[in-house]
Amino acid sequence: MVRGALALILFAACASTKPGPTKATDVTANPPRGMPRPPCIQPPELDSAISHARVDGTRLGFCVGKTPDQCFQLELVSGILTRLKAPPAAEPSGAHVELATPRLEVCKDKACTSLAPKVMPAMTGLRATTNADGTVAVVLLGDAPAGKGYAEVWDVAAGRRTATFKYARGEFRCGDVRILGDTIYLTVAACGTPAARGTLYSLKGKKIGAVGGKDFGTFGNAFVHVEGTTWAFLEENGNQLVLQDVAKGKVVKTIDVTHLWSADGKQAKDAMGNPGESALVSLGPGQIAVIAGAPSTGKIATIDVATGDVTLTRAPLCN
């Protein structure tokens, strides 16, 4: 694997939150001589969003767009790209929400607790999530497009609402929600527009801070766990990666990844991808990968958090 230096000191006390100069080596996903040429990716004309991104050991699987014949697997060590006959299998989930009006249930290990009679699941645009243990649920209610959306936090076992807060931010009104450890991550989009902003809240409904800082776009909702209370968030245009302590709201580090969108693998000011099309995955402890949507469909940036190394791998595109 060809590697380039990317200065990244995650937990240094004096670490700057501003992106510094970086460089990376851009290589092509090709097999050794004598082996058949790899498959190529045909970027869709309208939607090149990366989906079904999954990691299985040293293999990274993903799909491009919505057609079933555009799923691939990249061997991270050898750089060999192969075509998959079906999307990568989803990872087993723990506690989760089952939401289908009039049902609203928090389920874990086949045991489900219904919250439907108490939170009125027939309301328009309902969104809900739970934590890993299935003990806390957050439900988004109200008339979101009118700026009247609000969130309710529930103690699942007790069937008791513990907090309520509003979440609209000007033009950003249509919300989606996740729980990251003990922190609520609420991303709010400009309804019908590919732009969103994220905010962190405590389980008591108190605002902790904005995801990524001021004007950091979160459309596409690309985030992964790094370590402890630190999570990585990908900017909606795929040109910036932030590492943030979600318990305190502090941005630990900002990493410039504009070289994903340049032909020569170098950073390029204002270079960016289509909003919400790129994916972010964890490759294991201290390893993060960004899979680019259009216009660099299938290009992958692999970041080693511990050493600060980055590798750019370009999947071959069909002529």
Image: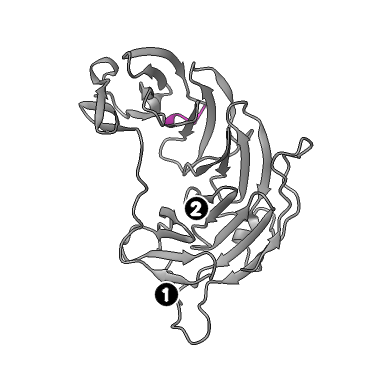
Q: Residue drawn at (37%, 13%), measured in percent from left and top?
A: 161
Viewed as shown, does residue 297 lie left or right of 3?
left
Q: Where is residue 51 in the image (x, y as percent from the top left)?
A: 40, 53
Q: Is mark 2 on a helix, strand or loop?
A: loop
Task: Identify the image quadrant of the N terminus.
Answer: bottom right
Residue occupying the far left of the picture: 102
Q: Which mark is residue 278?
A: 2
Identify whether 316 is placed above or below 276: below
Q: Where is residue 287 in the image (x, y as percent from the top left)?
A: 58, 51
Query: Would residue 172 be counted in the magenta stretch?
Result: yes
Compute the Cα span from label 2 to label 1: 20 Å
Q: Position of residue 144 (x, y in %)?
A: 39, 26
Q: Is mark 1 on a helix, strand or loop?
A: loop
Q: In which quarter of the image is residue 213?
A: top right
Q: Which amino acid does label 1 sit on?
A: Pro
Query: Where in the figure is residue 249, as x and y percent of width and height?
Result: 62, 28
Magenta part of the protein: which range? 170-177
- Taking the spot 56% from the left edge, 20% from the top edge, the residue there is 207
Q: Which residue is drawn at 47% across and 23% down?
A: 167
Q: Earlier in the sequence, mark 2 or mark 1?
A: 1
Depth check, front residue: 227 or 24: 227
Per the image, the residue denoted by label 1 is 39
Identify the residue shown where x is 44% and y is 73%.
Answer: 40
Other-residue count near label 2 (Cα within 10 Å), few / some / many at <14 / 14–19 / ≥20: many
Q: How crowded is mark 1: few (under 14 residues within 10 Å), some or many (20 or more)?
A: some
Residue 262 forms part of the magenta stretch: no
